[in-house]
Amino acid sequence: MRFRELTEADLPALLDLCQRTLPYDSFNLPLLRRRVWEEPHHTPAYQITAWDGDHLAGAMLGGIRETPEGMGAWIRLFTVDVPYRRQGLGGALLAELEGRLRDAAYKRLRVGNSAPNYLWPGLDVRYTPAFCFLQKHGFERTGEAVNMLVDLHARSWDTSADEERLAAEGFAFRRLTPADGEEFAAWLTQQWNPTWLAEGLSSYANNPISTFVATYQGRICAFASYNVAIFDNGFGPTGTEVALRGRGLGRILFYRCMEDMRQLGHATAEVCWVGPIAFYAKVADAWIHRVFWWMEKSL
């Protein structure tokens, strides 16, 4: 068995491995390239693969992110092909990653929730072997997150009446444009956190641009994005300025995103890393679809 760093040329082999071993997720090559190869602070030394000849037998892909406490370390994706399981390969890959992170003076290692540009907001609890593996190697649960699913064909997403009502108060709603770039970046920086800044701006890489904004008297005051994190058809982040909440701006922008995804031919949308569960249950008949556990260990 030979260990080496992941290369861009390895992405098709990684896609094949993920499609065969991670059945609760829908992988494709553009997604892997964007989430794995084009991640922030891309560090090949932390993306370790195991090869049996020309066959990719396992992967332990780590990454680093800025946090309020400084740079932090994550396992972003890991899997071992079925014929190679229970032979110590996963443990060997993890030990290799942990050793490299210790050499770089990282103190803790987390799993999954490596925002921005993440695949999962934690470990999907249905991947039971993965949980058992992490628990065996010293990881502990520290929290949880949920995603909710929306049936895009179950209701109308028309917002014309509400938009007409709010237009009389000085509000307007539209898709983000390239000309908004400087204003949008400055507004995100002022109102929100660096994670949402990165995710909101990454919507410019999509065609069409996958962010809608509300403006008040001509200036941006709320936004909603999709397809900037997790897998395809993932909704979020979204936010409205505190002083303007309660007017329905967020719901209109959410509906705009849902209609956009429906028009693109999708049947469902997944609301990522949900905070207000009751809100999405009320306005979209969304239901809790996936549960994720945050796990971490000391290095």
Image: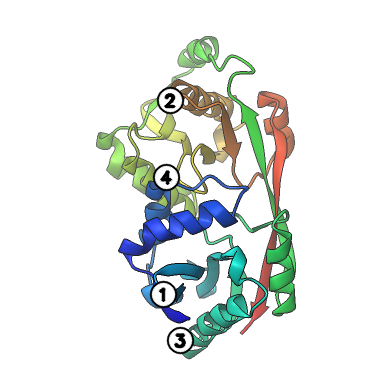
Q: CA distance from mark 1 to mark 3?
A: 30 Å
Label 2: few (<14), some (14–19) or many (≥20) C-alpha neighbours in 10 Å: few
Tell me which label, 4 or 1, sits earlier in the chain. 1
Q: Please name the residue that numbered disc 1 is placed on.
A: 53
SS for dot 1 = loop
Q: Is residue 182 visible?
A: yes
Q: State the separation of the CA atoms marked 4 and 1.
A: 41 Å
Q: Nearer the viewer, mark 1 or mark 2?
A: 1
**Mark in the foreground, 1 or 3:** 1
Please tell me which residue is depicted at 54% across the width and 29% down the height of the picture.
Answer: 254
| Residue carrying label 2 | 264
Q: Quadrant of residue 207?
A: top left
User: Which marked residue is nearer to the observer: mark 2 or mark 4?
Assistant: 2
Residue 282, horizontal then vertical, whole percent: 72, 26
User: Can you identify the residue that label 3 sits on?
Assistant: 104
Q: Residues within 10 Å of mark 4 (few under 14, many from 20)?
A: many
The mark total stands at 4
Label 2, label 4: how far apart the Cα atoms are: 20 Å
